[in-house]
Amino acid sequence: MAEETQNQEEVDTTEETTQAPTTYTQAQLDSEADKRAAKALETAKAKWEAEQAKALEDAKSEGARLAKMSADEKAQELEKQRQAALDKREAELNQRELSTSTKSLLVDKGLPTEFAGSLVALGDADKIKTAVENIQKTIQETVNKQVESKLQTDPPKNGASALVGADDPFNKIMAQYKK
């Protein structure tokens, strides 16, 4: 009796999984797409508003902090901020310059410029140059080994090219000239 109930349940579950796929009209698909787009926009808007609120709070707290400072302290703080902004810009410019010089070095050495991103992470032009030279040397050695292995041929078997004695046609021709 328990087996019959179990068999009945198995039949019911297989019937549910083999139902025909649901088809939707274009209007239903458009409606679903609109709902998803609206939800994504709402999420993005909420995130943007939260970021703006945080930025506003940070600006207010910075303004309140500056208001409590004396004139000399304000000047020092503004100078620190200005110096930090200059340092940041200088670092970005140096990074861009290093990236450009690394790409040109790779092009000069005949290497792909896709290596530039990982090489720039080294941060030092001398280290980058050494790494590029090592990469070029390694690639060249590997290519040479592959070329040599492809060009290497096996010696002929059965003495196929070893013509000696009376069977050698060149010896016959040479014998005519020696007379």
Image (cartoon, grey):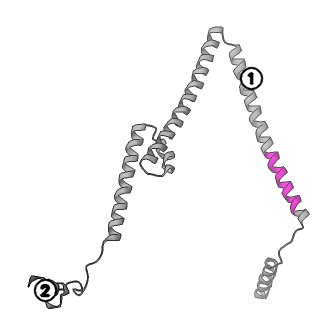
Identity of the residue drawn at 51% across and 45% down: 117
What type is the residue that disc 1 sits on?
Lys
Q: Is residue 91 left or right of residue 15?
A: left
Identity of the residue drawn at 25% across and 85% down: 157
Question: Which residue carries the number 2 mark?
Answer: 176
Camera-near label (2 vs 1) is 2
Q: Nearer the viewer, residue 168 or 13?
A: 168
| Location of residue 10 by image quarter | bottom right
Other-residue count near label 1 (Cα within 10 Å), few / some / many at <14 / 14–19 / ≥20: few
- Main SS, magenta residues: helix
Q: Is residue 40 within the magenta segment?
A: yes
| Location of residue 29 by image quarter | bottom right
Q: Is residue 103 above or below residue 21?
A: above
Helix, strand or loop at mark 2: helix
Q: Is residue 10 left or right of residue 123?
A: right
Q: Position of residue 11 (x, y in %)?
A: 79, 84
Q: Are marks 2 and 1 in contact (CB under 8 Å)?
A: no
Upstream in sequence: badge 2 or badge 1: 1
Q: Position of residue 156 (x, y in %)?
A: 26, 82
Query: Which residues are the magenta region?
Result: 29-43
Question: Which residue carries the number 1 mark?
Answer: 60
Of the 4 image quadrants, the one containing the N terminus is: bottom right
Identity of the residue drawn at 69% across and 18% down: 65
- Checking the image for residue 118, the label placed there is none
Q: Is residue 124 left or right of residue 25?
A: left
Identity of the residue drawn at 56% across and 33% down: 92
Q: Is residue 146 above or below residue 77?
A: below
Determine the CA span between mark 2 and mark 1: 110 Å
